[in-house]
Image (cartoon, rainbow, N blue to C red):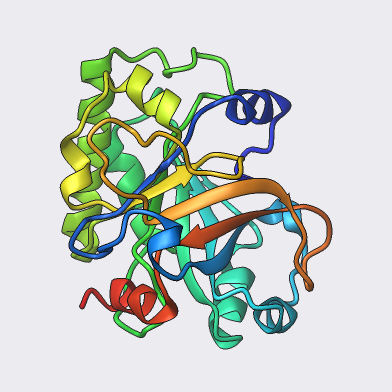
């Protein structure tokens, strides 16, 4: 995903098996062959100014938009992207790039919820996503945390976000990172939709305990009218009506 867009992150993510899932109650099918898929993108400031009307006219139906990172960074393009995507008819959600080694999960969840990650039942706002993946900065691939420490950090974030918004956050991750850094933790997948990151022609193996992916980021080099340069492309594992149901928590 175009989060930090560091070379290290791109190298790490390109070789990893990847991400995925959603609560079984929200998505009844396990593969794109079993149901319709819905096209989407994820963006940050690296995409520059976006013509969201052109994006929607190109068939893109949803977008995850970078809102925050850590406890002090808000993407400078977030406000414009979030409003303009909505106005163009794109179902949008915010995402937060996790920095587990700099502050508590609850602190970062509150920062997200206060800076664009809130939720409303308006048919176009998804629950926000926690982007948790290999550390592109110093501090170790798993942010210097033990598997228990990482589980606790993620649970703290998820609990706080749900307390603030009433929604289960989406989780973006790769299968490799998740299994290594959380010790193949299965806990979140009963309720939290999986957004799988795997740049490949197939989703591949899912994180431990995940039975289905909800969103799949399948390339970092996509092209979409209205966006300059490469953009991450995604699928939702269902049709637009099911995506709206997720947005509205129905």
In front of the other: 131 or 76: 131
| Residue 236 placement (x, y as % from top left) | 45, 63
Q: Is residue 31 above or below residue 72?
A: below
- Quadrant where the image shows the N terminus: top right
Q: Is residue 61 above or below residue 181?
A: below
| Residue 172 placement (x, y as % from top left) | 42, 44
| Residue 207 placement (x, y as % from top left) | 33, 33
Position of 159 with respect to 92 (left or right) is left
In front of the other: 10 or 156: 10
The residue lying at 29 percent from left, 36 percent from top is 105
The residue lying at 25 percent from left, 53 percent from top is 161
Q: Is residue 12 above or below residue 80?
A: above
Position of 76 with respect to 54 (left or right) is left
Q: Quadrant of residue 85?
A: bottom right
The residue at the far right in this view is 229
The residue lying at 43 percent from left, 38 percent from top is 173
- Quadrant where the image shows the C terminus: bottom left
User: How many numbered badges does the structure rendering display?
Assistant: 0
In front of the other: 144 or 225: 225
The residue at the far front in this view is 33
Position of 226 with respect to 79 (left or right) is right
Position of 197 with respect to 180 (left or right) is right
The residue lying at 47 percent from left, 31 percent from top is 133
Residue 102 in view (yes/no): no
| Residue 120 placement (x, y as % from top left) | 31, 77
Residue 103 in view (yes/no): yes
Q: Quadrant of residue 222?
A: bottom right
Q: Quadrant of residue 14?
A: top right
């Amino acid at each position: 995903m175009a989060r930090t867009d560091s070379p290290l992150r791109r190298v790490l993510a390109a070789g990893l098996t990847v991400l995925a899932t959603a609560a079984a109650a929200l998505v009844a099918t396990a593969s794109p062959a079993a149901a319709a898929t819905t096209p989407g993108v994820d963006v940050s400031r690296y995409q520059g100014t976006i013509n969201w009307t052109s994006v929607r006219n190109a068939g893109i139906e949803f977008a995850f938009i970078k809102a925050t990172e850590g406890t002090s960074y808000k993407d400078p393009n977030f406000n414009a992207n979030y409003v303009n995507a909505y106005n163009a008819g794109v179902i949008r959600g915010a995402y937060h790039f996790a920095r587990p080694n700099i502050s508590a999960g609850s602190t970062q969840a509150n920062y997200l919820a206060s800076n664009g990650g809130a939720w409303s039942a308006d048919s176009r706002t998804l629950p926000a996503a926690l982007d948790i993946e290999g550390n592109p900065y110093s501090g170790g691939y798993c942010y210097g945390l033990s598997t228990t420490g990482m589980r606790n950090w993620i649970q703290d974030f998820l609990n706080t976000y749900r307390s603030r918004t009433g929604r289960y956050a989406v989780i973006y991750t790769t299968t490799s990172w998740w299994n290594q850094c959380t010790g193949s933790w299965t806990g979140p997948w009963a309720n939290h939709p999986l957004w799988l990151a795997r740049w490949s022609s197939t989703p591949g193996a899912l994180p431990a305990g995940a039975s289905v992916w909800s969103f799949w980021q399948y390339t970092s080099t996509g092209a979409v009218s209205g966006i300059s340069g490469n953009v991450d492309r995604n699928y939702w594992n269902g049709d637009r009506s099911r995506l709206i149901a997720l947005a509205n928590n129905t």
